[in-house]
Image (cartoon, grey):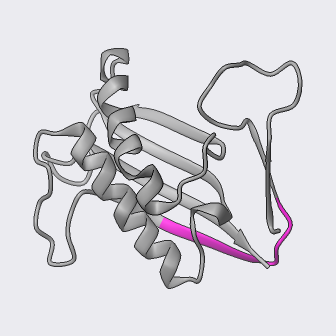
């Protein structure tokens, strides 16, 4: 297995992700920031954070699959969310939960960062996700 996820004793708990990932494979996969657009560039889930999280993760899964990877190979996820505030966590987590089984996203998640930003790609983009994976 190219990816081992763990949370060493003494690290903050409970959280919905592992604090550490170890990638032992020789091929790295870096999926560029994915947003809520379909293959034709149509806007998906305008003004809906949960819907945009779900679509961005679906697009991330397509990028991983193109390299022969899945979410099981991911060593880190990074989310950027516009105008972040703690009140948005329920919508964010709902979007993640909506596609966890569909996309085979491990639970707990690999190490993950959620970074609040003022602005992304275009004004309607609420979230962008990057994925980093390791393959043998």
Residue at 58%, 41% in the rendered image = 112
27 is within the stretch colored magenta:
yes
Q: Is residue 13 above or below residue 61?
A: above
Residue at 86%, 18% in the rendered image = 10
Q: Is residue 126 left or right of residue 21?
A: left
Looking at the picture, how far across and down is residue 75, in whole percent? 68, 56
- In the rendered image, the quadrant that contains the N terminus is bottom right
Q: Visible in this render: residue 119? A: yes
Residue at 28%, 57% in the rendered image = 55
Q: Is residue 18 above or below residue 30?
A: above
Residue at 80%, 34% in the rendered image = 7
Write the start and end of the magenta stretch as one range. 23-31
Looking at the picture, how far across and down is residue 67, in whole percent? 56, 83
Q: Visible in this render: residue 117? A: no
Looking at the picture, how far across and down is residue 11, in whole percent? 80, 22
Pick whichever, 75 or 95, lies toward us: 95
Q: Is residue 21 left or right of residue 82?
A: right
Q: Is residue 117 above or below residue 59?
A: above
Q: Is residue 73 left or right of residue 44?
A: right
User: Which corner quadrant of the image does residue 134 belong to?
Assistant: bottom right
């Amino acid at each position: 297995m190219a990816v081992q996820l763990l949370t060493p004793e003494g690290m903050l708990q409970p959280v919905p992700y592992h604090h550490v990932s170890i990638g032992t494979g020789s091929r790295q996969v870096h999926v560029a920031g994915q947003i809520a657009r379909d293959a034709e560039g149509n806007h998906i889930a305008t003004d809906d954070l949960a819907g945009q999280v779900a679509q961005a993760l679906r697009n991330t899964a397509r990028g991983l699959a193109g390299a022969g990877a899945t979410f099981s190979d991911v060593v880190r996820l990074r989310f950027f969310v516009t105008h972040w505030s703690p009140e948005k966590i329920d919508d964010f987590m709902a979007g993640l939960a909506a596609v966890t089984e569909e996309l085979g996203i491990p639970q707990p998640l690999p190490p993950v960062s959620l970074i609040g930003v003022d602005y992304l790609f275009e004004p309607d983009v609420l979230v962008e996700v990057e994925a980093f994976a390791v393959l043998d």
